[in-house]
Image (spheres, rainbow, N blue to C red):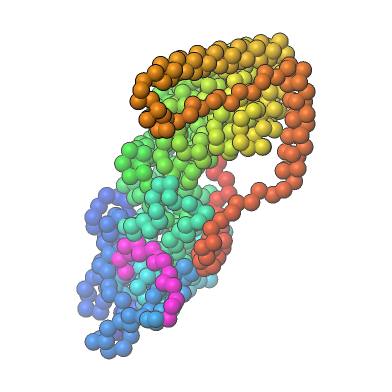
C-alpha cells in the first residue's frame, strides 16, 4: 500500500485522555498472512491489535463487557439478552413464569478493546482531494467490533457511529463514480473479513427430517444491525461500475472464498441470503476462482451426504449452482457430468431432502435440458434412491420425475419407460392416498400422455393391472375418481389394446382363482385325513377356520365402459370444485416468536434474481 496512507489517523478515542491515535494500514484478511495492523494506539504507544479469529478474519483480543457499578459487583444474573431484534432485553425474575427465550446466536466475535469512535465528517461535504483518505478512515473505523450478545445495551453511541458510517459508505459508493481507487481495495476486503468471518455457534435446531422450516424458528444473528450493512457495502463494492477484478484478486483469494463458504452453515436465513448473492457475484467476476468454488462446494456436499447430514445452507448453495449450471457452455465437460451423477443425485437420499428439494430438482432439470443424453442415468439413479416407506419423500420424487418427463425427448423416454412405469404402477397401488393421487395426476399431463400413446403396446399392460385393481379395492374415494379418469383416457387412446388388457387381466385373475381353489381343495383333503385321527376332536377347537377369498363377479365390458364414463364425469366435477378452494396446511399450536417473525419479514432480499455469469464455463 502507498506510504501516504500510513499517515492517516483513525479517530478512535482513548478512554483516559481522549487523544486521537495514529492507525496503521489495514491488512488484507484474505492474503494468507497472520500479520494484521493495529486498530488503534493508546496514549502510551501500546498497540491494540485486531488479529484473525478462528474463522480467519475477525478482529481478536476479546475484551470483557463493561460492567456497571463497582468492579467487585457481579453482573446481574436476571438479565437475559434477547436479541431477536437489536437491543431488546428481557428481564426474567425467578418464579415469574416467563418462558425463557431461545438463545440467540453467540457467534465468536472478538470484541475490540477500545470501542469509542469519533464521528467523522460526511464524505459529500469533504473536499474532493480529501475524500479518499476520509473514506479509508471510515472503513478502518468499521473494523471495530462491538458486543451484541452478552451486553447488547453497551456502547450504544459508538454502535450508532459505526452504523451511520456504514450506511453513508453504502450510499456514497452507489451514487458516486471514480471512488474505488487502488488503496480502497485492500481496506474494503479486510474490513469485510474482520466483521463477517467468525466461528459459528453450534446448531440449536434439530437435524435431518425432524427440522421443519415452517415450524422451527431460526436462530437470528445478534450483530445483524452491523452485519447487514457490511454485506450491503461489500455487494455495492463488487457491483460498482468502477470495480476492477484485477486489483481485487490480489486480496480476494482462495482463503477468502473458503471462509465465505463456511458461513453458509449460519442459521440466520437473512445472512445466507446475502452470502448467496455475494458468492454469486464473486463467481461471476473472478474467473480464476470458479473451479475452486465448484470444488469446495463439492466437498461440502460430500460431507453433508456421507458424514453430517446437517447443513443450513444447502438450499442456497443449490440456488447458486442452478444459476451456474444455466451458464455452462456446451458440450458439457466431463467434470460437470460427474458432478450431476456423483453429487446432485446422491443428495436425494438425505433425510432432510424437503428443505432443499425444489432447488435440487431445478439443478437436475437444467442439466437435462443442456444434455438430454444424461436422462437415462439420472432417471435410473432416481429409481435407485426411490423411498420405500417415506411417503412425503415419495411425493417429492414424483414431483421431480414429472418435471424431468416434461423436458425428456422421445428417444430418451424409450430407454427408461419400462422401469419408470413399473415404479409408477407401484405408486398407483400405494395404500397412501397422497402417493397414489400424485401418481394418477400424471394422466392429466398432455405431453406424458402423448409419450404413453406412442408406446401404448408396452406401457398399457404394465399400468393397467394397478389401475383396474384400484378401481375396485382402494379405500379412498378420490382415488376411485382419478383411477376411472385414467382408465377412460387409456380406453380412448387405444380401444382394441384396452380390451386386450381387460381380457388378459381377467384371464390372470381366473388363473389365480384356480390356483387358490386347488390349494383349498388340497387343504380340505388334508383335513379329511386328519379327521380320521382319534385325537382330532381334541385339537379341533385350536384350529382356525379357513379364510375365504373375496371374489367379485366378472364385469361385462359394456357395464365397465358405462361405469368409467360416469365416474370420469364425476371426478372432473370434483376436481373443478377443489380448484376453487384454497389449499390450507394445518400447523401446530405452538406459539411463534413475534420478534423473530418481524425480523424476518423486515428483511429485504439481497438480490431478486441470480443472473448467469457473463463468461461460459
**In the image, residue 109 lies in the stretch drawn in magenta:** yes
Task: Using the rendered image of the protein, determine whether residue 330 is visible from the camera's viewpoint.
Answer: no
The x and y percentages for residue 526 are 42, 17
Residue ID at (52%, 65%): 591
Q: Nearer the viewer, residue 392 or 126?
A: 392
Residue ID at (54%, 13%): 514
The residue furthest bottom is 70
Task: Using the rendered image of the protein, determine whether residue 391 is visible from the camera's viewpoint.
Answer: yes
The x and y percentages for residue 160 are 46, 74
Q: Please identify the quarter of the rendering in which residue 42 is found.
A: bottom left
Residue ID at (40%, 47%): 208
Quarter of the image where the N terminus is located: bottom left
Number of labels in the image equals 0
The secondary structure making up most of the magenta span is loop
The x and y percentages for residue 97 are 43, 78
Q: Nearer the viewer, residue 341 or 390?
A: 390
Residue ID at (30%, 66%): 110
Position of 261 with respect to 446 (left or right) is left
| Vertical relation: 156 (above or below) 315 | below
Q: Nearer the viewer, residue 524 or 572?
A: 524
| Vertical relation: 14 (above or below) 350 | below
The x and y percentages for residue 150 are 35, 73
Q: Nearer the viewer, residue 279 or 83?
A: 83
**In the image, residue 58 lies in the stretch drawn in magenta:** no
The segment highlighted magenta reads 96-111
The residue furthest front is 534
Amino acid at each position: 500500500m502507498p506510504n501516504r496512507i500510513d499517515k492517516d489517523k483513525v479517530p478512535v478515542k482513548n478512554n483516559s485522555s481522549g487523544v486521537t491515535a495514529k492507525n496503521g494500514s489495514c491488512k488484507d484478511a484474505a492474503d494468507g498472512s497472520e500479520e494484521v495492523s493495529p486498530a488503534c494506539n493508546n496514549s502510551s504507544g501500546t498497540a491494540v491489535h485486531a488479529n484473525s479469529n478462528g474463522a480467519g478474519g475477525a478482529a481478536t483480543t476479546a475484551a470483557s463487557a463493561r460492567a456497571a457499578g463497582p468492579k467487585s459487583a457481579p453482573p446481574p444474573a436476571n438479565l437475559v439478552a434477547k436479541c431477536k431484534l437489536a437491543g431488546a432485553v428481557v428481564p426474567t425474575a425467578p418464579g415469574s413464569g416467563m418462558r425463557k427465550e431461545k438463545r440467540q446466536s453467540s457467534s465468536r466475535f472478538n470484541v475490540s478493546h477500545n470501542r469509542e469512535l469519533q464521528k467523522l465528517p460526511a464524505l459529500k461535504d469533504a473536499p474532493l482531494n480529501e475524500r479518499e483518505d476520509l473514506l479509508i478512515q471510515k472503513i478502518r473505523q468499521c473494523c471495530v467490533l462491538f458486543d451484541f450478545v452478552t451486553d447488547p445495551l453497551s456502547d450504544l453511541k459508538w454502535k450508532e457511529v459505526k452504523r451511520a458510517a456504514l450506511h453513508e459508505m453504502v450510499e456514497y459508493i452507489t451514487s458516486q463514480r471514480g471512488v474505488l481507487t487502488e488503496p480502497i481495495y485492500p481496506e474494503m476486503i479486510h474490513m469485510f473479513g474482520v466483521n463477517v468471518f467468525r466461528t459459528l455457534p453450534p446448531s440449536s435446531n434439530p437435524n435431518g427430517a425432524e427440522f421443519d422450516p415452517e415450524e422451527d424458528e431460526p436462530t437470528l444473528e445478534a450483530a445483524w444491525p452491523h452485519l447487514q450493512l457490511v454485506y450491503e457495502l461489500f455487494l455495492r463494492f463488487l457491483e460498482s461500475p468502477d470495480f476492477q477484478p484485477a486489483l481485487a484478486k490480489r486480496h480476494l483469494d482462495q482463503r477468502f472464498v473458503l471462509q465465505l463458504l463456511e458461513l453458509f452453515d449460519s442459521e440466520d436465513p437473512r445472512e445466507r441470503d446475502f452470502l448467496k448473492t455475494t458468492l454469486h457475484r464473486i463467481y461471476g467476476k473472478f474467473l480464476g476462482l470458479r473451479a475452486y468454488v465448484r470444488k469446495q462446494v463439492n466437498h461440502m456436499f460430500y460431507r453433508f451426504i456421507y458424514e453430517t447430514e446437517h447443513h443450513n445452507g444447502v438450499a442456497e448453495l443449490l440456488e447458486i449452482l442452478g444459476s451456474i449450471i444455466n451458464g455452462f457452455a456446451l458440450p458439457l465437460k466431463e467434470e460437470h457430468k460427474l458432478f450431476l451423477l456423483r453429487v446432485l443425485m446422491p443428495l436425494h437420499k438425505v433425510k432432510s431432502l424437503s428443505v432443499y428439494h425444489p432447488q435440487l430438482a431445478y439443478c437436475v432439470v437444467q442439466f437435462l435440458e443442456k444434455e438430454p443424453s444424461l436422462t437415462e442415468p439420472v432417471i435410473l439413479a432416481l429409481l435407485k434412491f426411490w423411498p420405500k416407506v417415506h411417503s412425503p419423500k415419495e411425493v417429492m420424487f414424483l414431483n421431480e420425475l414429472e418435471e424431468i418427463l416434461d423436458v425428456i425427448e422421445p428417444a430418451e423416454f424409450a430407454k427408461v419407460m419400462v422401469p419408470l412405469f413399473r415404479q409408477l404402477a407401484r405408486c398407483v397401488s400405494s395404500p397412501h392416498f397422497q402417493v397414489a393421487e400424485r401418481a394418477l395426476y400424471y394422466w392429466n399431463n398432455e405431453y406424458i400422455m402423448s409419450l404413453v400413446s406412442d408406446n401404448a403396446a408396452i406401457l398399457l399392460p404394465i399400468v393397467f393391472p394397478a389401475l383396474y385393481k384400484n378401481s375396485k379395492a382402494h379405500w379412498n374415494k378420490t382415488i376411485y375418481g382419478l383411477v376411472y379418469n385414467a382408465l377412460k383416457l387409456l380406453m380412448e387412446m387405444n380401444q382394441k389394446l384396452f380390451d386386450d388388457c381387460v381380457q388378459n387381466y381377467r384371464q390372470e385373475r381366473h388363473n389365480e382363482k384356480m390356483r387358490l381353489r386347488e390349494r383349498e381343495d388340497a387343504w380340505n383333503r388334508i383335513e379329511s385325513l386328519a379327521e380320521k385321527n382319534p385325537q382330532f376332536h381334541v385339537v379341533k377347537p385350536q384350529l382356525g377356520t379357513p379364510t375365504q377369498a373375496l371374489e367379485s363377479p366378472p364385469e361385462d365390458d359394456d357395464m365397465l365402459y358405462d361405469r368409467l364414463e360416469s365416474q370420469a364425469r364425476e371426478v372432473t366435477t370434483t376436481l373443478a370444485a377443489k380448484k376453487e378452494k384454497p389449499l390450507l396446511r394445518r400447523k401446530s399450536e405452538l406459539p411463534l416468536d413475534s420478534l423473530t417473525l418481524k425480523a424476518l419479514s423486515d428483511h429485504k432480499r439481497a438480490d431478486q434474481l441470480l443472473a448467469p455469469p457473463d463468461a461460459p464455463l
